[in-house]
Image (spheres, rainbow, N blue to C red):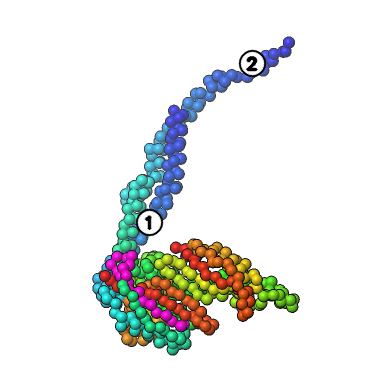
Amino acid sequence: MFALSCVFIAQHAHVLSEVQTVSAPLVAKLSELERREDALQEQVELSEIHAAVKLGSLGEKLDVYVLPKETDFERLIASWELLSENLKKQGYLAKMSDISFGDPVDMVESGVRAVPMRVNFAVHEKGMEYITKFIRLAGLLTVGDAITDEQLRKLMHSTEEENPAGIVALEQFLSLDLIRYARDVRAFESKLKRSFTSNAFANTLLEVTHNSLLSDARDLLEGDYGRYMQEVNLWPVQFVTLKSAKMSDGGAKGWHVLNLEILVWQRK
Amino acid sequence: MPKTNTKAVANHPSVGDVLHHVSVPFLIFTAVLLGFLSLSATLILPQLTQVDIAGKEHDAVELKELVKKLDTRVQELERARGEFVTPLREGLFGDAMDQKYNSRDLLLFRSKLEEITQQIETASLRPASAKATAGKQGYGWQENKNTISISSMTFDQRELSLEVEGKVQNVGPRSMTVLAQFINAVQEAEWVSDISPPKFTREHDEESGFYSPFIFTILLSE
């Protein structure tokens, strides 16, 4: 009888500790998950409405300009020339060399090839910054393309917390043409912020826009270069990545010779 | 012959006596305790462990399953929302974008190397400054900040390597020592995974005095 009592006491202790360590946190998690499920369900239904139209137009731009089947050399060279002219005008570039192309090579990613492109610059440090920003941004279509998955998660989470219906405004913001955003940052950000009442979302947005390629887009495209690119319809440019870069003394303080080898991506 | 304390022996109960006296109360106590515990196990414990969710009772095991199911559902909804909000993030463009996000920046490495050279320069110029202040500027100890001069950097994105070329100058015959300090400092940087050290030589010409040319390759951290 005593042994049986001991077993019962142990059982009571186990059950009570389980309630404390398992059930109570699970109930808290469950209510949080239910809240998220409701918010997400609402957001999915709202965003689904615009998705089909948006996907069609973005897909078309992607196939024609960003990852075309054949590289549009005229368009590509025009965008580089325009950049070089703009940098010269600002006093950041002394000379851009001829641009040469190699034979296309297969990439690790299936379904793409890349044309190697070589170009040299006699350039000031400030000009080098603009050139590297251009390489980073080339091939990005929308605001959403300029932020990482982690940053996107932060924004989404913030909409869930603040106002689930704000997903529509966020969706419109993320699908904005990158150049349109960069040319009028304040207007588009204000429009998005109006969907949320508290400062929490505004702070998240500020953090994301400052730590992402959106900040580069603003620096590169908000001035004359962005205006020219928009006027002559050269944005979006074809997708490029840097293969190698050599930077050597340019003969004067702050000036360098920059040799670039860039990969210009195209679909197979 | 020792005396036996007969009084003490008579008053001290044996273990058997003790057990005999406490057995009945102990039996009653255990029976009552067992009764209460049985009642508690059948009536109170289920009340404590069952959780009412939407009018339905769940125990801890069911609760775990429910949370798991809801977690999966939330992840599905997140994926669906992602596909609607940023539809091009998957597939070929998504892979291309990953390359873009993961690519490194030559200018960033340049500024990191400059930070290191400045630290080394500050350290190596301290004795020179002291001597200059005392009016005893020694042989080759010039107060020139351009101690580690990097003439070129070649960055290879695929190999994740950075070839650095330049020379250590304006520190007199200590140029090789300063070069070694520079190499050590670069090696310790967190963004460097490996380094192929340069050849340590010291040369001399009329214009630069003693100097140590270098060329080394850094393998960058993933």
Residue at the spot 38% in from the left edge and 37% down from the top edge: B42
Please indicate, yes or no, whether residue A133 appears anywhere in the rendered image: no
Output the chain of dot 2. Answer: B
Per the image, label 1 sits on a secondary structure element best described as helix
Q: Nearer the viewer, residue B121 or B85?
A: B121
Q: Quadrant of residue B182?
A: bottom right
Tell me residue B85's x, y (percent).
Answer: 31, 69
Q: Is residue A17 above or below residue B33?
A: below
Q: Amino acid at mark 2?
A: Ala
Quadrant holding the N terminus of chain B = top right
Residue B189, above or below B26: below
Q: Amino acid at mark 1?
A: Ser
What residue do we see at 49% from left, 80% from top?
A: A256
Q: Is residue A115 magenta?
A: yes
Kindly identify which residue carries mark 1: A31
> In this view of the protein, can residue B13 be seen by the observer?
yes
Instruction: Compute the Cα span from label 1 to label 2.
Output: 71 Å
Residue drawn at x 48%, y 82% is: A124
Which residue is situated farthest in the bottom direction here? A89
Query: Is residue A145 covered in magenta?
Result: no
Between B65 and B222, the residue placed more toward the observer is B222
Q: Position of residue A58 (x, y in %)?
A: 28, 74
Mark 1 touching mark 2, by CB under 8 A? no
Q: Which mark is residue A252?
A: none
Could you tell me residue A40's position as x and y percent? 33, 63
**Magenta span covers which residues?**
A105-123
Q: Chain of mark 1?
A: A
Q: Disc 2 marks which residue?
A: B10
Say few, some or many: other residues with alpha carbon within 10 Å of mark 2 (under 14 / 14 to 19 / 20 or more).
Answer: few
Answer with left or right where residue B111 lies relative to residue B93.
right
Q: Is label 1 on the same chain as label 2?
A: no
User: Image quadrant for the C terminus of chain B?
Assistant: bottom left
